[in-house]
Image: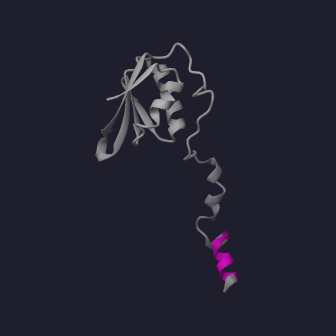
Amino acid sequence: MAKQKDEKTKGFNNPFARLEGLRDTLPSTKPQVSREDFPDEPPPHGPERAVVRLETGRGGSEVTVVEGLGLPAAELQTWLQALQRGLACTGTAEGERLVLRGDHRFKVPDLLLRRGVKRVVHG
């Protein structure tokens, strides 16, 4: 009986055995806060303030919105990618707003301050 169980957990009879090898290629579900994205000493030339709020997104899901950064579109995209890595979430840049999937109201201010934002306001 034990031999049959071992054969089923690996190899031919296990439909997920081939997927096990691909696990390392998947994006991480854990936040990756690197010094390049979020330095210990914030740069002195960052935005003056940012407004962070929780909104209901499409389909009733929660999204965290970051507004008021006043950055150009290319730099806003760079900030979005850094926040996505730092929070292990997905998001989009809609105009001058960063929309991050999930409730990150209590994590985002620290990351924004480390990127050089002078003041973070909850709105």
Q: Specify whether residue 81 is in view.
A: no
Q: Report x, y in % for residue 54.
A: 33, 37
In the rendered image, the vertical position of residue 99 relative to residue 13, given as above or below: above
Of residues 81 and 50, which is closer to you in this image? 50
Q: Report x, y in % for residue 100.
A: 41, 36
Q: Report x, y in % for residue 35.
A: 63, 29
Query: At 40% across and 17% down in the image, what residue appears?
Result: 70
Q: Is residue 46 magenta?
A: no
Q: Which quadrant would residue 10 be assigned to in this image? A: bottom right
Q: Is residue 119 left or right of residue 57?
A: right
Q: Report x, y in % for residue 72.
A: 44, 16
Q: Is residue 11 left or right of residue 73?
A: right
In the rendered image, the vertical position of residue 49 relative to residue 22, given as above or below: above
- Could you tell me which quadrant the C terminus lies in? top left
Q: Which residues are magenta?
A: 3-11
Query: At 46% across and 23% down in the image, what residue appears?
Result: 76
Q: Which quadrant would residue 11 be assigned to in this image? A: bottom right
In the rendered image, the vertical position of residue 49 relative to residue 38, given as above or below: above
Query: At 65% across and 50% down in the image, what residue appears?
Result: 24
